[in-house]
Image (cartoon, grey):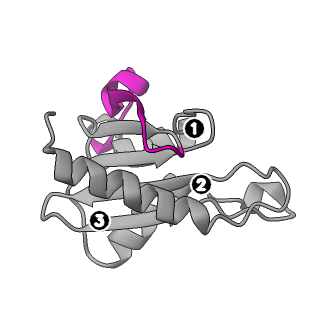
Amino acid sequence: MMMINETLAALVAKAAEGRSRAYIPYSHYAVGAALLDEDGTIYTGCNVENASYGGTICAERTALVKAVSEGARRFTTICVMTENGGSPCGICRQVLYEFNPDMSVILASPSGAIVKIYTLRDLLPDGFGAEKLP
């Protein structure tokens, strides 16, 4: 998906904003996400850790849950910002796939540089959605 520079810059800035809010007392690995709805609304998220590690939620799912709770369902792009260009974990890939397997996934560094751009389908080959359930 080709994106105009203003939209890309806004997504990177919002991912940085989300990253600045990360609650990371255990891993010290801050992640921010900015999820773009097809109507142009951007939803942000950060990772929120918990002493019960399984209770931790990733930035990507935080942004998605915020968006869905506001009624959004049609996402085109997510920008994820980490210190080292890390990509969404498997759980986040699957949860995002539910909404749009062709979503663009932009990985950005804290400097604002674009590290890599994928489609979600590239990151989760043979992913599944409702059509594969009985």
- Give how far across and how far down residue 104 sits, in percent: 28, 37
Q: Earlier in the sequence, mark 1 or mark 2?
A: 2
Bounds of the magenta segment: 110-130
Which labelled disc corresponds to residue 97?
none
Look at the image and tell me whether residue 62 can be seen: no
Q: Does 31 sit left or right of 28 as displayed? A: left
Q: Based on the picture, tell me whether residue 83 belongs to the magenta stretch.
A: no
* Position of residue 123 in the picture relative to residue 28 (left or right): left
The percent position of residue 54, horizontal first and vertical second, equals 76, 55
Label whose residue precedes the other's in the sequence (3 or 1):
3
Give me the residue at 38% from left, 51% from top. 12
Q: Quadrant of residue 74?
A: bottom left
Foreground residue, 107 or 92? 107
Residue holding disc 1: 89
User: Relative to 55, does residue 6 appear above or below in the rendering?
Assistant: above
Residue indicated by mark 2: 58
Tell me the amino acid under the disc marked 2.
Cys
Q: Secondary structure at mark 3?
A: strand
Measured Cα–Cα span from mark 2 to mark 3: 17 Å
Identified by mark 1, the residue type is Cys
In this rendering, the label closer to the viewer, 2 or 3: 3
Q: Residue at x 85, y 62 (%)?
A: 52
Q: Using residue 65 as the reference point, say whether residue 31 is left or right of it.
A: right
The amino acid type found where label 3 is placed reads: Ile
The residue under label 3 is 42
The answer to whether the residue labelled 2 contacts the one labelled 3, judged by CB atoms less than 8 Å apart, is no
**How many neighbours does mark 3 have within 10 angstroms: few (below 14), some (14-19), or many (20 or more)?**
many
Whichever of labels 2 and 3 marks the residue nearer the N terminus, that label is 3
